[in-house]
Amino acid sequence: MNKKVKKEGYYASIKRRDPAARNNLQIFFLYPGVRVLRAYRVAHWLWNIKLKFLAEWIMSMARTTTLIEIHPGATIGKNLFIDHGSGVVIGETAIIGDNVTMYHGVTLGGLKWEKGKRHPTIEDDVYIGTGAKILGNVTVGKGARIGANVIIREDVPAGATIKK
């Protein structure tokens, strides 16, 4: 994004990425990815002040209405857009940068049961296609594009496109 351009707001960023988005009211009330992120922001705050059970309960309730599972311990930047979000899973130690787009069935999952960083880091401006699975403590570099149904288990360089 050009530094001289005014910062883009959340709803404007969704309208840019989704031609079906008609207005802010529609996005606020009807987009499950937006609804679950509202719950996540509250739950993440609660998680950070050690009210972990309450944080997990809020996300459990959000999951039942959106079919999107985000652990309250995950770290999510600005303007995440989860389009057609059913089946999305974001693990506890996942880190997601700004302006990331992901579609239904995406998993940011772990491969180990030990404590510590075990979920992916997704840098800014990444696109993750339907059904992609990004597993383990890997990094997907800025501006990378991950195709539908791709399984990632190692780092992806910035700007790369992974299709298979």
Image: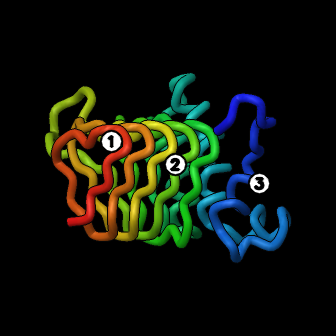
For the point 61% across and 51% down, the residue is 37
Q: Give percent across and percent down for residue 28.
A: 77, 61
State the mark number for residue 12: 3
For the point 55% across and 67% down, the residue is 83
| Residue at image mark 2 | 100
Residue furthest top in the image: 49
Crowd rating for badge 1 (residues with CA inside 10 Å; few <14, some 14–19, many 20+): many
SS at circle 1: strand
Q: Give percent across and percent down for residue 108.
A: 33, 50
Q: CA gap, disc 1 to disc 3?
A: 25 Å
Q: CA gap, disc 3 to disc 2?
A: 14 Å
70 left or right, relative to 111: right
SS at circle 3: helix
Query: Label 2 sits on what residue type?
Result: Val
Q: Give percent across and percent down for residue 105.
A: 38, 68
Query: Label 1 sits on what residue type?
Result: Val
Crowd rating for badge 2 (residues with CA inside 10 Å; few <14, some 14–19, many 20+): many
* 57 versus 112 height, above or below: below
Query: Label 3 sits on what residue type?
Result: Ala
63 left or right, relative to 140: right
Residue 120: image quadrant is top left
Q: Nearer the viewer, residue 141 or 74?
A: 141
Q: Give percent across and percent down for residue 67.
A: 49, 69
For the point 40% across and 58% down, the residue is 128
State the mark number for residue 140: 1
- Mark 3 or 2, nearer chain start: 3
**Mark 1–mark 3 CB contact (< 8 Å):** no
Image quarter hosting the C terminus: bottom left
Residue furthest bottom in the image: 20
SS at circle 2: loop
For the point 29% across and 37% down, the residue is 139
